[in-house]
Amino acid sequence: MRKIVLAIVFFSCLMPQQIIWANDTGVVVVCIEGSQITDSDAIQKSIQQSAGQKAVRKVLGRFIAPALEADSIFQTIVAESEKYVVKPVKVLKTEKRSGKKLFFCEVQIDFADLEAGLRQKIQSRQESAAHQDDEVFFFIRVTGINEFDQKRVEENNVMNVYADAFQTFGFHKSRADEIILNTTEKYKDLRFQDYLEQVRKDISNNVEISIAVVGEINLLPSETDAGGINSSSFCRLVLVKNSTDGQLETIGTFSDEYTIRRSIQKEAEKLVLQKAAYNSAKYLAHLTLEYWQRSNEIY
């Protein structure tokens, strides 16, 4: 199992994040090339099977990198696509193009079952994978809130969001140790770029850290007008890989701003922080999975 160490720093102005995939069904429309003869039961079955596989492949490609190897997790799930198709495939229309007959099909996919199947296979592969001592550390600074009670609530939300996001992909969670928390506390009052630079230096000097997420989520001042309250959050994070010689490689970055409008300010602030957390955690968890997929070749 991969180990995740959470080191989330909160300051005088503070707060949060979150995650995961759709928990219900969704419709995917795909185009399948078929035979000019369509009244055969075997041909109809083939079209439905091809449409189901293509739809699952399309959805799955949003979460893990496509792989061609027959024994890969990607191809294994595609091969069992019938498990995730909720209703019989519906042919919406047919067209003839360049001597070919095309079938436009509507496929309803159970995203919850697909997620569970992917998670189970990832966990199974990781339990037998090499380099099981790899760890992911989170140095996420959250700023923008002064109220202590609200800060504590949002702190718990951030911890849960990132833990859930990475656990979805089979990574084991653990708490940050005191040394990491003390290190991040030293830099809580620095400007973002200075904070980023100092934490990167600490990471490069610590051979125990293999992969780390460094950055912050900032709650911006809310704006009020006659129609309601607009609350915004801005997040910027970097995913880095630390080599044994202390050289950091940037695996990916995430930066975005969100605005939510509500009649109550605290509700707007909570939701906009959750939005930033959900999107950043989901994206960075996916990037981490792709990194292990490439480096360990287990998917």
Image (tube, rainbow, N blue to C red):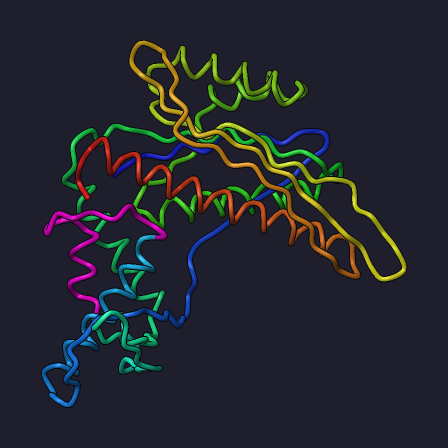
Can residue 23 be seen in the rendering of this structure? yes
Bounds of the magenta segment: 62-81
Asked whether 226 falls inside the magenta stretch, the response is no
Asked whether 80 falls inside the magenta stretch, the response is yes
Can residue 83 be seen in the rendering of this structure? no
Residue 229 percent across, percent down from the top left: 80, 55
Q: Quadrant of residue 25?
A: bottom left
Q: Is residue 35 above or below residue 123?
A: below
Q: Is residue 142 above or below residue 26?
A: above
Q: Is residue 271 above or below residue 137?
A: below
- Residue at the extreme bottom: 39
Residue at point 40%, 70% (across, down): 26
Residue at point 30%, 70% (across, down): 31
Residue 90 percent across, percent down from the top left: 31, 82
Residue 10 percent across, percent down from the top left: 62, 32
Residue at point 50%, 42% (across, down): 280
Q: Is residue 225 above or below residue 176?
A: below
Residue at point 29%, 13% (across, down): 244
Q: The N terminus appears in which quarter of the rendering? A: top left
Left or right of residue 222: residue 37: left
In front of the other: 25 or 103: 103
- Residue at the extreme front: 98
